[in-house]
Amino acid sequence: MFARVSSLSTARAAAQRPMALRMQRRYAGGPPSYNEPSGYLFGEKPPAPGQKREKAAWERLWYWGFYGGMAAFGVLLYYKPDKSVRQWATPEAEKRLDESGLPWRYKPSPNSGYPEGIPK
């Protein structure tokens, strides 16, 4: 069913192909797709003594955008309006319970330190 192809017949078939098919250029290769390790942090050589590191053009924008965004987020989160159910439902429920005349507030024991109730 499956016949073995000898290396001689493969060589003959390759020799019979036209020259354009035998000598194809393949552009799939190229240099390594990663940065070769240099031994320096982030691949940057340290500056000479007495010189400052030259920053890239994007670094200042990154620092201001990242840390400024975090600061703005913190301020907005601090002043975020409270939209919880407890915030808007509690005063209404207390008002209704007070109007009904039923005792609903917690009354501590006389030995608790607050015999008249917990102050509001």
Image: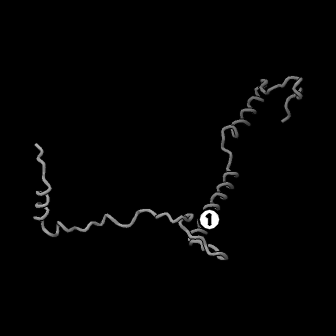
Q: Position of residue 25 (x, y in %)?
A: 25, 68
Residue at the (46%, 64%) spot, across then down:
36
| Picture coordinates of residue 46, whole percent (x, y) | 60, 70
Return the residue nearer the eye: 82 or 88.
Answer: 82
Up-down: is 20 above or below 83? below
> Looking at the figure, which quarter contains the N terminus?
top left
Which of the 4 image quadrants contains residue 105? top right
- Comparing 6 with 120, the one in front is 6
Q: Quadrant of residue 83?
A: top right
Q: Position of residue 56 (x, y in %)?
A: 57, 71
> Is the C terminus in the top left, top right, bottom left or bottom right quadrant?
top right
Tell which of 51 and 69 is nearer to you. 51
Q: Residue at x 60, y 63 (%)?
A: 65
Q: Is residue 56 left or right of residue 100?
A: left
Image x and y of residue 53, in percent: 62, 73
Residue at left offset 89%, top offset 26% = 115
Disc 1 marks a residue whose amino acid type is: Tyr
- At mark 1, the secondary structure is helix
Give the quadrant of residue 71: bottom right
Q: Which residue is mark 1?
A: 63
